[in-house]
Amino acid sequence: MPKNTTTPAINTATDIPLFLVPRFSYYTGNTVRSGTDIFVSVINGRPAAYFLLHWSDHRNDCIPLPEACVIRLIKSLAVMPDTERGVQYSNLAKYVPGFYEQPDEPGDVFFLREDDVCRKYREHFRQGPEST
């Protein structure tokens, strides 16, 4: 995990999921033991706060995330067969309207330049069979 990880006051029972790693692997037939979810925390009077929650049997790490990166990450996860089922479309419509407003540019979703601010967040998502 990057050194800038933090553990803010998050509550996965009340914070809104935008992407949840499927907890069962069709590749192995087992429960997934680690993954990264995307949540938004909405508190009246404050701007929405987006974050990655990287979880495992051993620890949980929370990483703040810019809204622009949320949109790009979820768009890339939505087209991958092993992660598409984790996208929470009804929550995106309500809490990330920019997800539907921004034009789809194929290069923007799949190819991140070296200096792209969203590049460092993509490494938290695996794009193949899960290890259990």
Image: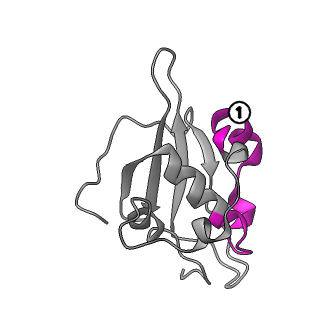
Q: Using a 10 Å C-alpha cutoff, classify the residue at mark 1 as few (fewer than 14 neighbours), some (14 to 19) or many (20 or more).
A: few
Quarter of the image with the C terminus is bottom right
Report if residue 120 is visible in the image. Answer: yes
The percent coordinates of residue 109 (x first, y second) are: 60, 66
- Helix, strand or loop: magenta stretch: helix
Left or right of 111 in this view: 65 = left
Give the amino acid type for the residue marked by disc 1 in the picture.
Answer: Lys
- What is the magenta range? 76-98
The percent coordinates of residue 105 (x first, y second) are: 67, 63
- Residue placed at 43% from the left, 62% from the top? 121
The percent coordinates of residue 36 (x first, y second) are: 50, 61
- Residue placed at 70% from the left, 74% from the top? 82
Quarter of the image with the N terminus is bottom left
The percent coordinates of residue 85 (x first, y second) are: 75, 63
Left or right of 59 in this view: 46 = right
Residue named by callout 1: 94
Q: Nearer the viewer, residue 117 or 32?
A: 117
62 is higher (above) or lower (below) than 36: above
Report if residue 22 is visible in the image. Answer: no
Taking the magenta stretch, the answer to whether it contains residue 129 is: no
* Corner quadrant of residue 113: bottom left
Farthest residue in the left direction? Answer: 3
7 is higher (above) or lower (below) than 94: below
Taking the magenta stretch, the answer to whether it contains residue 78 is: yes
* Corner quadrant of residue 39: top right
